[in-house]
Image: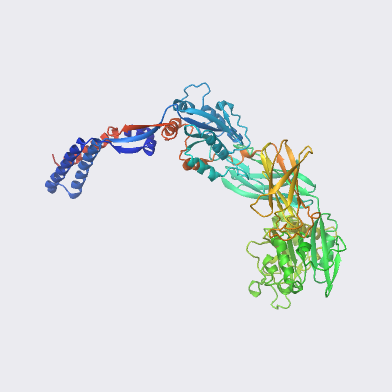
Amino acid sequence: MILRVFEWLFGNPPIAFERGELMLLAPWPVFGAAAALIAAAVWYVLGYRRVGRRLRPRERLLLTALRAGAISLALLCLLRPQLVLSLVVPQENIVGVLLDDSASMQIADAEDNGEGMRRGDAVLRAFPEDGSEVPGALGPELDRQFVTRFFRFSDTVERVSSPSELSFLGARTDLFGALGRVAEELGAAPLAGIVLLSDGAVPAAGPGAPDFEQTLLELKAQGVRVYPIAVGGSEFETDLELGVPEVPRRVLRGSMLEIRIPLRARGLGGRTARLEVLDEGRISASAAVRLEGAMVDTAVTVLTPVEEAGARRLRFRVAPFPGEEMTRNNERSALVLVEDRVVELLYFEGQPRWEMKFLRRAIADDPELRVACLLRTAGGKFYRLDVASPGELAGGFPDTREELFRYSGVVLGSVEASFFTQDQLDMLRDLVSLRGGGLLTLGGGSAYSEGGYRGTPLAEVLPLSLAEDPQAPAGASETPASPFRSLRVLPTRAGAAHPVVRLDPDPAANRERYQNLPLLSSVNLAGLPKPGASVLLEGAREGGVPEPVLASQRFGRGRAASLTVQDLWVWQMDAAVAVEDQTHELLWRRLLRWLAADAPRRVEVSIHPARALLGEPIVLEASVEDERFLAVNRAVVEAEVTAPDGQLEVVPLRWNGEADGEYTGVYRAAAPGAYRVEARASIPESGGGRDGAESAAGPERARPVGEAWFEAGRVDDEFFEAEADRELLSRIAETTGGRVFGLDEADRLALDLSLAASGATVIERRELWNVPALFLAIFGLLAGEWCLRALRGLR
C-alpha cells in the first residue's frame, strides 16, 4: 500500500529513483521567470519585516519559510526536473529463471499458503501452464517484457522447457555451481538478469564445490544481476533435528565408541527425547534428553560397544513428536570401520614392581593389544617380555625414531629423567606431537617432579604441570621427602561420560562402583591440570581437597595421559575386591586402546564426500609418511577401490603439490552400496622425505597400506538444515546488484528487471514537474501561510 501511494505521488515507483538519474531541462527564458520569482520572495520577506511588531520572531521566521518554500517549489517546476531511465527493450532481452529442483522443495511450509503448501507447488503456481492470466503470477509478468529461459538445478543443472518438468527429488543443492553455469550459458545473449526461485538451503560445501565468494564476484564482474525469490519458512515452529554425528572414521574391535550427536529442537520445551543408536538394526545404546525451553541447541554423548569387525553402519534416531513439521531430519547414519588388528605399545619400567605384572595379566585376553615390556633390572641390563622377535628391544630403550615410532603408544613407569638421553626425550615428545601416538606416565618414586622431569621435553607433553609447592595438591604431606597419600578415587563429571572411565552405563551405578573400590596411593607432587587438559579421575584423602589422578590432553597429533597413582593393581588383588570383579582389567584395556588405537598410520586415507551420489566425483586423499613419519612427496600411490559387487578398480593418486605427503585422485561410483578403499604407497629408497634425505626403508619394505570406506547411492542431506536461508539469498542479491522478492511481488520484480540497464536498453525521460507531490506541497505551504496570517489578523 505504501509503495502504491508513493508511486501515485511521484509518478514512479521507488526503484525508478534508485536506478534512474535526475536532470533539469529548462529553456533560457525560464531563468528570467526564476529571477522574477526570487525578487517576489525578497519582497515578501521585507514585507514581513514591516509588520514585525504584530508578529513574534518565531512566527515571522515560519511565515518567511513557508512563502520561500512555495516559491522554491514553483521555481523547481519551471526548471522542468526529469527522471532519466535506462529501460530494457520489450521482448529483446532474456531472463534466466533458475528453479530449485531439490528434495527440500517438498517441505510444506510455503509462507503464502495457510494450509501448508509445498514449496515446489508454490513455485509451480507462479508459472501457470496454460498461459492464463493468474493474478500475481510471476510467469505472465515476465512474459510481457522478456524472453524467459528455464533451468532446473539440484546436484546438477539443466535446461527445461517449462517448470512442469520439475520433480523436486534432487539429493543436493549446488546453488553456486548452478548460478555459474546459467550465467555462462546465457552470457552471449542480452541478459536482463537471473531470477532464482529457491529456499537457499545449501548444505556445507565439500572439496571440489564452487567457491561461494568467487562465484559471486565473477557474476558481479560480468554484470549479471541475480533476483532471488525466497520460498519457504525461515524456521520450523515445532521440530527436532539431529546434527552430523561426530564419529571416528575407525575404531578397534571391542572398544567403546564415543559418539557426539548435535541436537536442535524448536517448540518442544518440557518434553523428553530418547536417542537410540542402532548397529546394523540392533539397538546398541540409548540416551534420554530433557528438552528445556522453546529453543534447544545441545549435543548428546553416547557410548556404544563395537564387537564385530568390518564396515558397520550405525543409525541414530529419535522418535518423532506429535505435531512435528519435519520428521525426516530425526534420523542420521554413519559408516564406521571396526578394525580387527593388533595395536602395539611399549611399556618401560625403571624398577621391578607389581604394576607391570598385573598390567600384563589385565590385557592377556585382549587379542587387539600387544604391549612389549622392557624392565630395567640393574645398571644397563634389561629384561624383555612379550616381544615379537628376538631383536625387538635388544638394545634397551629405543634410540632411533624408526624403532620407537613402530609403537602406537608408550607407557612410562617409574624411571628417572636422567636415564634418557636428550635425543630420547625429544623422540618421546615427537612420538606424541609428530607421530600422533599416545604417552601414558605412571606414578612412582622416580616419576614426574620426583624423577627430575621438570624442564624436560616431556614436561611439555604431560597434562599436569610439574611446578613445585605453589601448585602442589592440597592435602599433601608437609614433609616433601615423604609425600605418601592414600586416596579415594572417583570419576569427575567429565570422566563419568568418558569411554575409559565409564564402567557402567548408569552414571549413579558407575560412581558407586568406584566408591566400593579400595584406596590407592600416590607419592608424586604432580601439579594442576594445564589449560585444555581433562581430569577423568580424581582422588582425595579423608577431608582433603581432590587432586588429579587420571588426566589427559591432546598434544600435537597425539594424546598424553598421566595416571599419578603407583598401585592400580590393588583394584585387582585387594581382599575387598571380588574375584569376578573386572574393574582393573576393563580399565587397563580401555585406557590403552583409547591411548593408542587412533594413532595415525603411515598411510591415512580420507574420502570426500563420505556419502556420495552415483556418478558424483569422489575425492580420494592419502597422506603418506616414511618410517620416521616424515611426509613423502615422491611415493607411488595407488588406491584400490572395491565395489559392493567385489569388482576392483585401481585409481592412481598423485601428489597435489600443495602440502607435503598429500596425494589425491577422483573416483565415480556406478552402483549403490559400501565401497572399500585401500591406498598402497611405494616409497623410493632415496629422496623420499621432504628434505630429500634417504628413506630408511627399502622399496620392498615400504609398502604401507591405509584403508577407508564410503557409501554411494541415495543421500538425505536436503532434509537437514532445511529452513529457507533468506540471509544467504540476500547476500547473493546484494553482491550482484539484484534484490530479494517474495512470490507475491511479481509486478515489482518485473519492473526491477526492466530497469536493470542490462542487455538491450533504451533511454526514457519522465517529467517530474507535474507530479501530484509537487502541487500538493505548494498548496500545503501556501495554505499553511494563509492560516497563520489569518490567526494573526494579517491580510
Tell me if residue 539 can be seen.
Answer: yes
Is residue 791 something one can see in this rendering?
no
Q: Residue at x 55, y 27 (%)?
A: 163
Rendered location of residue 380, percent (x, y): 83, 74
Residue nearest the observer in this picture, 449 or 567: 449
In this rendering, position of residue 140 left or right of residue 717: left
Residue at x-position 19% and y-position 35%: 29
Model colouring? rainbow
Seen from the viewer's position, the closer of residues 574 and 456 is 456
**Residue 54, position in %: x, y?**
13, 47
Q: Is residue 325 left or right of residue 794?
A: right
Q: Position of residue 79 (x, y in %)?
A: 25, 37
Judge left or right: residue 278 versus residue 56. Answer: right
- Closest to the observer, 385 or 331: 385
* Farthest residue, direction right: 390
Quadrant hosting residue 23: top left
Rendered position, 301 above or below 112: below
Residue 109 in the figure: left or right of residue 192:
right
Residue 752: name its quadrant: top left
Q: Position of residue 781 (x, y in %)?
A: 23, 39
Residue drawn at x 20%, y 49% as measured from the top left: 58
